[in-house]
Amino acid sequence: MSVDFPRAWEITRSVEREYHHNRCSYNTHGMLCDCDVLMKHPEQLDATFYGAGGRAIRAADEQPTSHGAGVSDE
């Protein structure tokens, strides 16, 4: 499904620059990866949304909650 922004940076930085495409934004401008290193990472391709450290946040079929602080389900 996808990864959040902090996880995308973890994945990007975990791979040496030489393995990123020559035109990848990480190599050319030091920006977030836009090549296969991130786009074809297993966490991008399955049905779960991942956060920092590779922690699963939610499955694709779960609805995100919109509860604010101090709001209960009751």
Image (tube, rainbow, N blue to C red):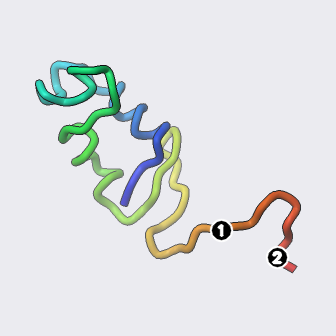
Find disc 2 in the rendering and name its residue.
73
Q: Which comes before the other along the chain, label 1 or label 2? A: 1
Say above or below: 74 vs 1.
below
Q: What type is the residue that disc 1 sits on?
A: Thr
At 33% from the left and 61% from the top, the residue drawn is 46
Find numbered disc 2 in the image and state the secondary structure of the residue it sits on: loop
Say above or below: 16 vs 40.
above
Find numbered disc 1 in the image and state the secondary structure of the residue it sits on: loop
Return the residue found at the far left. 22
Find disc 1 in the rendering and name its residue.
65
Question: Picture coordinates of residue 68 (x, y %)?
Answer: 78, 61
Q: Is residue 46 left or right of residue 35?
A: right
Q: What type is the residue that disc 2 sits on?
A: Asp
Q: Quadrant of residue 15?
A: top left
At 52% from the left and 40% from the top, the residue drawn is 52
Pick whichever, 54 or 68, lies toward us.
68
Return the residue found at the far bottom. 74
Q: Is residue 55 left or right of residue 21?
A: right
